[in-house]
Amino acid sequence: MTYARAERMSDPTEPPSFVPGPGTEREFRDALGAFATGVTVITAQSSIGPLGITANSFASLSMAPPLVLWSPGRFSRRFDAFVEAEHFAIHVLAAEQFELGRHFARQGHDFDLPGVAVNAQGVPVLPGCLAVFECAREAVHEGGDHAIVVGRVLAARHRRGLPLVFHRGNYGGFGA
């Protein structure tokens, strides 16, 4: 393994490595941006009413039991409400739902949207998404400047369609 690393470092076609930290924040963010992600909206009921937030930190965790995770940033004014929520829903956005994602990225209190329903746990559920995972909070873990919220999936649904994708700071669709 040491030999392979030395070979790669001497390859002039490979970009130079850097150490993430003070002074390389932009470079680290750009490296992370090379990984394309889907776009989700997380919704929950909070002490101030229904709340939503756009996030790209969603991942599946376990099939048995059915667990998923997402990671809200501590810098968000909505952070406390989401890590404290007993129930939440994760909505995987379709390519044509860019405006819905932008809506909840800007503010999280306006649910005056067509077709919004409320599930048995009182969580707002958005229509037209590629997939929806209705969850009960299983655990919250420390994650640096984010938290890692693990949810047990109580109900799920999905449909066919193309996803909304986030890559290198831009939103777009994905075509096979």
Image (cartoon, helix red, strand yellow):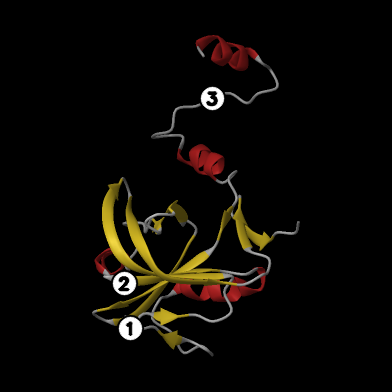
Mark 3 → mark 1, Cα distance in angstroms: 48 Å
Q: Is the Cβ of the residue at disc 2 closer than 8 Å to that at disc 1?
A: yes
Q: Nearer the viewer, mark 3 or mark 1?
A: 1
What is the total number of numbered labels drawn onto the structure image? 3
The kind of residue tagged 2 is His
Mark 2 → mark 3, Cα distance in angstroms: 41 Å
Q: Nearer the viewer, mark 2 or mark 3?
A: 2
Q: Which mark is residue 87?
A: 2
View extreme (top): residue: 3
Residue in front for this viewpoint, 87 or 106: 87
State the image quarter where residue 95 is shown.
Answer: bottom right
Q: Against 137, is 51 above or below?
A: below
N-term mark: 3 or 1: 3
Q: Residue at x 57, y 69 (%)?
A: 93
To which residue does mark 1 refer?
122
The kind of residue tagged 3 is Ser
Residue in front for this viewpoint, 153 or 104: 153
**Relative to residue 121, is residue 174 drawn left or right?**
right
Q: Residue at x 28, y 60 (%)?
A: 138
Specify whether residue 100 is in view: yes
Image coords of residue 62 (percent x, y): 41, 52
Q: What element does badge 2 sit on?
A: strand
Q: Residue at x 45, y 80 (%)?
A: 125
Image coords of residue 39 (percent x, y): 54, 62
Label 1: how many residues lie within 10 Å, few (<14), some (14-19) or many (20+)? Answer: some
Mark 2 → mark 1, Cα distance in angstroms: 8 Å
Specify whether residue 75 is in view: no
Image coords of residue 152 (percent x, y): 35, 62
Q: Against 128, is 2 above or below?
A: above
To which residue does mark 3 refer?
17
Label 3: how many residues lie within 10 Å, few (<14), some (14-19) or many (20+)? Answer: few
N-term mark: 2 or 1: 2
